[in-house]
């Protein structure tokens, strides 16, 4: 009986030790997962904060002088396309003023040969889908070439004309008095779209 009681006591003790060990392993695993999750959350929050700070610094940094020049002449080309290929009675005078400021005299006379809009009230031409391609720009240059590709929508209501053209032009600019002036335009391709 003593042996039997010792075996039962030993078995109960072994089961108790195994239970405590399994319970410790379970708790340790849960604590490890919770700790790892908290560490990942802290790391994630830190990286988000760092990312936001870097974005703010990037917004505060001015573009380089070379990038500013590139933006300036690309903006001039966009304006040129808008005032030269956008033709309709409404807004004619405003476009004409802008054109005079960004074109040399000969080119201005080519695109605005008269003082008034002579195409009629139902004529309109509107460029869209503008893409600009730039030659290599190293900065400090006084002349640049830009290739412009766009779709032009022509509407003449009186004649029931609704056409679209795909145009590719080469625009030449030179720097005069710290601003870019368009002095030449060459049509490279004009194709009627159906």
Image: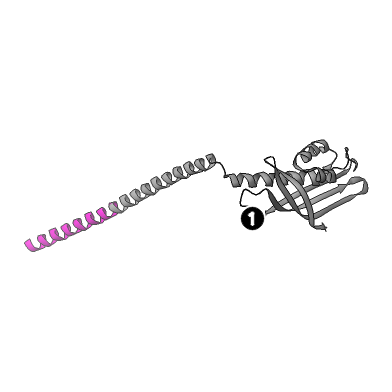
Residue 4 placement, left or right of 82? left
- Residue sitting nearer the eye, 36 or 55: 55
Magenta stretch, main secondary structure, is: helix
Q: Does the image show residue 1?
A: no
Q: How many marks?
A: 1
Quadrant in which the N terminus is drawn: bottom left
In what element is the residue under mark 1? loop
Is 2 one of the magenta-colored residues?
A: yes
Identity of the residue drawn at 48% across and 44% down: 54
Residue found at the far right of this picture: 159
Q: Which residue is mark 1?
A: 136
Residue 79 placement, left or right of 158? left
Colour option used:
one colour
- Residue sitting nearer the eye, 19 or 141: 141
Quadrant in which the C terminus is drawn: bottom right
Identity of the residue drawn at 84% across and 49% down: 154
Q: Position of residue 185 (x, y in %)?
A: 78, 51
Q: Position of residue 169 (x, y in %)?
A: 77, 54
Q: Is residue 45 above or below residue 24?
A: above
> Alpha-carbon neighbours of circle 1 within 10 Å: few (<14), some, or many (≥20)?
few
Q: Does the image show residue 53?
A: yes
Q: Position of residue 25 (x, y in %)?
A: 27, 55
Identity of the residue drawn at 74% across and 51% down: 171
Is 113 one of the magenta-colored residues?
A: no
Residue 48 placement, left or right of 65? left
- Residue sitting nearer the eye, 6 or 146: 146
Q: Position of residue 170 (x, y in %)?
A: 75, 54
- Residue sitting nearer the eye, 126 or 21: 126
Magenta stretch in the rendered image: 1-27
């Amino acid at each position: 009986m003593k042996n039997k009681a010792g075996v039962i006591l030993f078995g109960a003790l072994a089961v108790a030790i195994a239970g405590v060990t399994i319970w410790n392993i379970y708790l340790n695993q849960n604590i490890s997962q919770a700790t790892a999750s908290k560490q990942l959350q802290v790391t994630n929050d830190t990286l988000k904060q760092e990312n936001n700070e870097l974005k703010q610094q990037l917004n505060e940094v001015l573009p380089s002088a070379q990038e500013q020049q590139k933006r300036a002449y690309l903006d001039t080309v966009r304006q040129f396309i808008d005032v030269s290929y956008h033709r309709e009675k409404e807004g004619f005078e405003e476009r004409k003023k802008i054109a005079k400021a960004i074109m040399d005299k000969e080119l201005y006379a080519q695109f605005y040969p008269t003082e008034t809009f002579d195409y009629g009230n139902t004529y309109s031409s509107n460029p869209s889908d503008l893409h600009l391609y730039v030659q290599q720009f190293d900065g400090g240059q006084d002349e640049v070439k830009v290739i412009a590709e766009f779709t032009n929508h022509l509407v003449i209501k009186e004649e029931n004309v609704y056409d679209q053209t795909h145009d590719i032009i080469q625009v030449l600019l030179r720097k005069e008095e710290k601003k870019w002036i368009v002095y030449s335009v060459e049509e490279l391709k004009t194709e009627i779209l159906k």
